[in-house]
Every structure is written in structure tokens, then in C-alpha cells.
Image (tube, grey):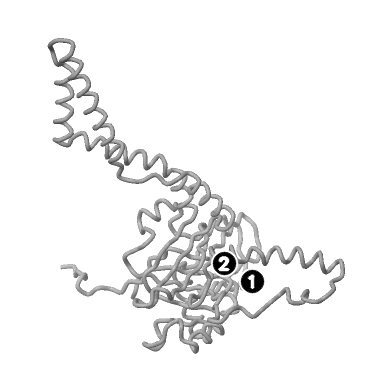
Amino acid sequence: MNLYDYLYVDLDKVISLYSQLTGGVVELRETQSEKGSTSDNKRNYDFKVFKHDAGGTTQDREQDRTTIKPYHALLQDLEVELSSSGYLLDLAHIENDETLKDTELRGTLKNALCVKCTGRIVIEDYERMKKIGQDFPEIVKLINRSNAESLKDDPEYQRIEQQIKDLESTAGDKNKRAKAKKQAKELRETLETLLSTSTAVDMVPQWILDGMGTWIDAFLPNITNIRVYPFEEENEEHIFGHLDATNFTVADPTAFHFTYGSFPTEEFTMLGIITSVPSVEDESFAPLQEFEKEELEDYESVENAFRGMFRGFDGMEAMVRTCRYPRVLVHPILVYRETSPNKALRRTSR
């Protein structure tokens, strides 16, 4: 039996799809309380899909009962149902020479509800990027200050510093002391220049950091992307989508990135609803074509102006949405790592 480490679960979508496929109503939890009364209260439950059956009698008892549907069994059952019903394309089962550029495969994707793919993944948390951008100036100051302090431990630095102290304590006539003081000043300026130019990290102009935050707030608020690369040699071909922060199994984004990182070393699997399969040709659908005539009525002119504003922003949104051929955009439902049992790790009890 394989085990699954689920990073992300869109439970609302899981329940919706599973209920449609099985024709039943999925209840994850039911709490029932009964107190000293006579009532009809006989209930039968199917562990896959909860089905209600009224009948029977209870008398004078007090009881609290909670019924919980097996969480991971539901997720695995959904994959089985999608596959057996013809709604899921698993990229692990395509021909070896096929990639996302294959015309027939893209046709299949357009007619499939869901796609499943396994490969290396990249997590792009834009809110985390914005937070780092806000703190970046102070982080750079800390790193460079640490680098400067480390420089002071260098033997050559300490030698020059000792030379300065000797010059500053020079005895003798006025001219000799003045000359020594001038040399000490020059050496001190040399050390200060050395410290100021020994930066480990260059400072990014503040206007760039502020602009990045504004861009994220305008076009990428609360966005965390996932990109899955199913073909090792085809890095431009990947399946990607937006992850809702509330559906992560590790709720704290900082803890998630500390544990898994934005570029995990292990392969993960994503199952998602296909939302866009871009064509290699330019988009031919032109929703504003109805206004391309010599004369427009007043109400048409107003509508054309407002709707044209939306289309005017399409170019900027395309730069951040990055849904272009040969990529495929999905609404992620599950993201997990699947592990098979390792016979070499098995231990038998004596």
C-alpha cells in the first residue's frame, strides 16, 4: 500500500466532484445528540457515501456521537472515480514521445475535465516575495554590517589599525607629530573606504522594491503559483495553477517554505481541473468585434468604452498570468507526494 503526503487539498472541489460521480451526498462529519426522549432515530451509513435511513425507536438515553468520513480514502477514491469514468488524463500513461506540444495530446486535454501529472515542482508565493521586498533594505544592511565586522578580524586590517595607533601616539617635536597624524588620517580613510566597499550584497533601489509591491497588490494579490514539470528535458512545458492559501495542509506559509522550500528536491503529483489549453496560434476569439462598424448608437459607444477598458488591461494581466503555449493552466485540487513501501526498510519483530 502506498502512502501519501498531501501538501494541498481543495476539499470543497473534492466533495463536489465525488458527489457528482457517485450520485450521493458526502458528509465529512455528523454530530448527533440525544437526550431522554422517545423518537424515531435509526440511521444507517455507507462509509463511502453517507446515506440516511429513517426508522426504529430509541428510548430514554443520552448520547453524543460523531461520525467522521475517512479523509484520505475520499481523496484516493476520487482519483479512481475520475479515471474509471473517463474524466482524468494521467500524463504518466501517455506515449513516451508525446509532450505538451503534441497536437493530439492537446486535443485530448481540451476534452478532459482533469489532468494528473508528476514531476519536479516550483512554488511561487508572491505575498512572501512582497514581504521579503519590504524587509530587504534592513536585511542588506545586516548582511553588509556582518561582512564589515568580519573584515576587522582580518590580519591585514588589524596590522593597519595597529599602525594607525602607533602613529597617533608618536612622540617628538610638533612637525613629527603633525606628519604622523596626517599619515594616520590617510590610513584611517583607507580602512573606512575598504569597509564601505566590501559589501556582500548590493542594495536594490527603493523605487524598484516599492514598484514590485504595487505590481503584486494590483495583479497578484494573495497569489501562490505551483508549476509541475512532467517532462525532465522539456522545461518550457509544465502544468501550473494558483493555490488557495486556506487549502494548504501546512497552514503557516513560513513553516511550509522552511519545510518544503520553493523548489522541493522530490517529485510531487498534482491533480487539477483543466481551465486553459492555449493554442500555438494567436487567439481568434474577438468579443469586441460587434462594435467594429461605422456608426454606433450612444448606448453602444458607452458599452464599447467600458468593455474596451477590460481588454486594455489584458496585455498587463497576460504578463503575470503567463498562460501561454505550450503550458496548461489548471485549478489545482490535490498536490501530494506518493511513496511506495521499501522492502529494505521492513523490520520483523522477534
Q: Is 211 drawn above or below residue 332 in the view shown?
A: above
Q: Earlier in the sequence, mark 1 or mark 2?
A: 1
Of the 4 image quadrants, the one containing the N terminus is bottom left
Front residue of 126/35: it is 126
**Residue shown at the point (42%, 41%) measured from the top left:** 137
Where residue 292 appears, as percent x and y from the top left, is: 77, 76
Q: Is 174 drawn above or below residue 133 in the view shown?
A: above
Local secondary structure at mark 2: helix
Going by the numbered disc 2, the residue's amino acid type is Ala
Labelled disc at residue 318: 2
| Distance in Å between CA atoms under marks 1 and 2 | 55 Å
Q: Looking at this rendering, what residue extends furthest in the front direction?
A: 175
Front residue of 213/18: it is 213
Of the 4 image quadrants, the one containing the C terminus is bottom left
Tag 1–tag 2 contact (CB < 8 Å): no
Q: Quadrant of residue 98?
A: bottom left
**Residue shown at the point (47%, 47%) measured from the top left:** 131
Q: Is 187 drawn above or below residue 151 in the view shown?
A: above
**Residue shown at the point (22%, 21%) measured from the top left:** 182
Where residue 63 appears, as percent x and y from the top left, is: 55, 56
In this rendering, would 279 be left or right of 159? right
Labelled disc at residue 54: 1
